[in-house]
Image: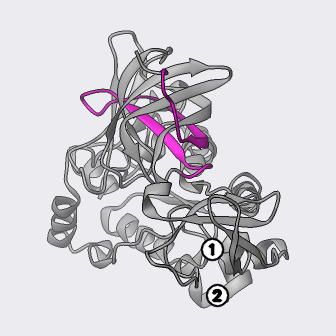
Amino acid sequence: MAAVLLKETGHEVVGLTAELSAGLIARYYGPSRASTNAESARAVAESYGFPLHTVNLENDFYSIIVQPFCSEYLSGKTPNPCIHCDSLIKFDRLLRHARSLGCEKIASGHYARIMKAANGRYYVARGRETVKDQSYFLFMLSQESMKDIIFPLGDYTKSKVRKMAEERRLSAAERPESQEICFIPDNRYAEFIERATGKAPGPGDIVNTVGKVIGQHRGIHTYTIGQRRGLGIASLGPLYVVSIDARNNRIVAGHREELETAGLFADTIHYMRETDLNDRRVLVKTRSTQTPVAAYLKKEDNGILVVFREPQVGISPGQAAVFYGDEMDILGGGIIVRSIKNTTGSEP
């Protein structure tokens, strides 16, 4: 629909389809599991009379996205590969290819908007779609790339876009929704990591928050922070994964209140609308689907301390913390290093 809307409003459109993981999936799972998105793109290009170029970025995708994802997971973190793919593959490698073809802009179907602040800086903001908002994944886009990016769907809801696609009889209108990582079929992370790396971390202890052994785990790469199912431990109340201790090959489990954190520390800070986030009250998302929560930011060492107004759960090292202003415009963000139980005295 992004391409169709631009074509209908008089733009000269060139289609770009990036081959990212089809070969990888075919190698590990067989060709029948590879994505059919390329065929859908080809059908739209033929119907609307614009050329379609296929760009093979599989080598870059594997080295820049897949390998670090596996390494992070094996170290007990929960990385978000989509964030890095958007900034380093789609709006870097693919944008370069678009420029090499003489294109002035690159457009995609993201549900978000790109704006320009009074200070001259470009930034991403939430679009009209709120439930499927994709701004969270885009906080690492560079100023250089944002000046040449268009999000034609930013002013529409997803239901409206699907209706418009149905009216134009686009095959993609019937495509089911998916929240899977594109290179991991059926969200079977552990299986993929074992196939991709040839490594299967061994079993180890599950301990409670005071260090007492209460069970055994199947390998740390099969668990995530906040996970409740699959622990296999009898308890008076439900137990959750509170933290992952990769160095000692341990899973720490506790009750829900033990998941609560007062804040977090993030590094790899990327500035978007602003260039200084010290001593700022903001809204923050630590997961793409999370309702933004109020927090206070304080610059510390090489990162930012985030103090929540109210305790939060499910803070996972490796995920992103994205900071928004009141209008849901992205001020900046970073990668979560650790959660913090007690931040007393950090906020004035």
Depicted 109 relative to depicted 200: above or below: above
| Left or right: 73, with 348 as reference point | right
Mark 2 vs mark 1, CA separation in Å? 19 Å
Q: Is residue 299 visible?
A: yes
Magenta residue span? 316-345
Q: What label sits on residue 299 in the rendered view?
A: none
Q: Earlier in the sequence, mark 2 or mark 1?
A: 2
Q: Is residue 15 visible?
A: no
| Left or right: 227, with 209 as reference point | left
Residue 33 lies, in percent from the top left, at 58, 85
Residue 226 lies, in percent from the top left, at 50, 63
Residue 127 lies, in percent from the top left, at 26, 42
Residue shown at the point (35%, 51%) measured from the top left: 290
For label 2, the residue is 31
Residue shown at the point (48%, 65%) measured from the top left: 255
Q: Nearer the viewer, residue 146 or 328?
A: 328
Mark 2 vs mark 1: in front: 1
Tally of numbered tags: 2
Q: Nearer the viewer, residue 150 or 66?
A: 66
Q: Secondary structure at mark 1?
A: helix
Name the kind of residue labelled 2 in the image.
Pro
Q: Is residue 318 magenta?
A: yes
| Left or right: 22, with 121 as reference point | right
For label 1, the residue is 189
Name the kind of residue labelled 1 in the image.
Tyr
Q: Is residue 199 magenta?
A: no
CA neighbours of label 2 inside 10 A, class few (<14), some (14 to 19), many (20+): few
Residue 96 lies, in percent from the top left, at 61, 40
Q: Which corner quadrant holds the C terminus?
A: top left
Q: Which corner quadrant holds the N terminus?
A: bottom left
